[in-house]
């Protein structure tokens, strides 16, 4: 028999929104458009984007590449950390970055 108390507690925990902070960067193609596409996708799939920083341009560090365009966002979400990570990695893959998944997700 399922415990009603356990179900209510779990529902409360998962429906209680948390604020998380994310940094986003793009250095290939139309970097500003890439950031905008990522913002729309995150807002649609992961939670509500609350605030967006100014865009900052930075040089690559540790490797040769184009400069990065970077932003930080605050996101209100009800997702658990691992679910949020999977969602963000799926967004990156859909937006064309499949290399990131191999680096951050265990096999």
Image (spheres, grey):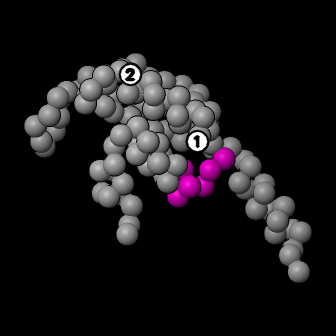
Quarter that holds the N terminus: bottom right
**Nearer the observer, disc 2 or disc 1?**
2
Q: Is residue 69 above or below residue 42?
A: above
Question: Of the numbered discs in the image, which one, if any, rests on residue 72?
Answer: none
Residue under label 1: 46
Which residue shows up at 73% across the image and 56% down it? 13
Q: What span is colored magenta in the figure?
A: 78-84
Q: Are the two marked residues, 2 and 1, in contact with CB atoms closer than 8 angstroms?
A: no
What residue did someone put label 2 on? 33
Q: Is residue 65 left or right of residue 9?
A: left
Q: Position of residue 39 (x, y in %)?
A: 49, 29
Mark 1: which secondary structure? loop
Magenta span contains residue 86: no
The residue shown at (34%, 49%) is 98
- Residue at image location 53% in from the left, 36% down from the top: 42
Please name whichever residue, 70 or 91, is drawn nearer the observer in this view of the structure: 91
| Label 2: few (<14), some (14–19) or many (≥20) C-alpha neighbours in 10 Å | few
Residue 46 in sight: yes
Question: Could you tell me which secondary element the residue under label 2 belongs to?
Answer: helix
| Residue 46 percent across, percent down from the top left | 58, 42
Residue at 48% x, 52% y is: 85
Toward which corner of the image does residue 97 lie, by quadrant? top left
59 w.r.t. 7: above or below: above
* Left or right of 61, for residue 73: right
């Amino acid at each position: 028999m399922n415990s009603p108390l356990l179900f209510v507690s779990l529902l409360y925990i998962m429906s209680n929104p948390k604020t998380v902070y994310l940094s986003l960067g793009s250095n290939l193609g139309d970097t500003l458009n890439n950031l905008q596409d990522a913002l729309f996708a995150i807002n649609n799939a992961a939670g509500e984007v609350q605030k967006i920083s100014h865009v900052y341009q930075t040089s690559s560090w540790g490797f040769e590449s184009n400069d990065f365009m970077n932003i930080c966002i605050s996101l209100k979400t009800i997702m658990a950390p691992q679910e949020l990570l999977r969602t963000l990695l799926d967004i990156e893959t859909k937006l064309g970055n499949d290399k990131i998944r191999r680096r951050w997700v265990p096999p």
